[in-house]
Image (cartoon, rainbow, N blue to C red):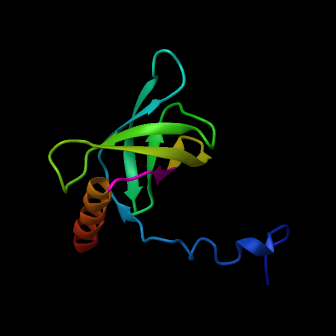
């Protein structure tokens, strides 16, 4: 039995994620595109997967906004820079989907997820 007003297409959607998520608490910077001066926001990561990252920001963006993320991951000593799109927003929590990853970026993210999987 489903709760009232629960859309059928969402049955099991939370459990049916494409990639497992791993907790990560590190610094993240997000820069928007399109304006003369890019706006950079500083936040903290919550989780990461092969497909994206979740983070906390004091202020932010609408869903669909393209951003460049710089985050600190255990797989490398320098911050990882990736392009992403805001896919979800709830209060100060944002979900970003990685877009246009090159092979090096993908390997760093994969290595980060494997490392975090061993720690959790």
For residue 17: magenta? no
Residue at 46% over, 16% down: 37
For the N terminus, the quadrant is bottom right
Residue 21 image position (x, y, % from top left):
41, 66
Which residue appears farthest toward the top when viewing the image?
Answer: 36
Foreground residue among 5 and 77: 77
Q: For this rendering, which residue is in front, 41 or 5?
A: 41
* Residue 8 quadrant: bottom right
Q: Is residue 44 above or below residue 53?
A: above
Residue 22 position in % (x across, y down): 36, 65
Compared with 26, 7 (above or below) is below
> In the rendering, at what x and y percent does residue 114 appear?
26, 70
- In the picture, the quarter occupied by the C terminus is bottom left
The span picked out in magenta is 96-102
Relative horizontal placement of residue 77, taking residue 6 as reference (left or right) = left
Tell me which residue sits at (35%, 61%) in the image: 23
């Amino acid at each position: 039995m489903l709760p009232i007003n629960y859309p059928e297409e969402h049955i099991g959607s939370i459990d049916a994620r494409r990639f497992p998520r791993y907790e990560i608490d590190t610094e993240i910077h997000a820069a928007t595109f399109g304006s003369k001066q890019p706006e950079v926001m500083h936040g903290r990561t919550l989780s990461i997967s092969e497909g994206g990252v979740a983070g906390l920001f004091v202020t932010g963006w609408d869903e669909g906004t393209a951003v460049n993320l710089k985050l600190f991951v255990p797989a490398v000593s320098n911050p990882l820079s990736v392009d992403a799109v805001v896919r979800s927003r709830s209060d100060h929590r944002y979900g970003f989907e990685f877009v246009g990853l090159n092979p090096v970026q993908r390997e760093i993210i994969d290595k980060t997820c494997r490392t975090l999987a061993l720690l959790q």
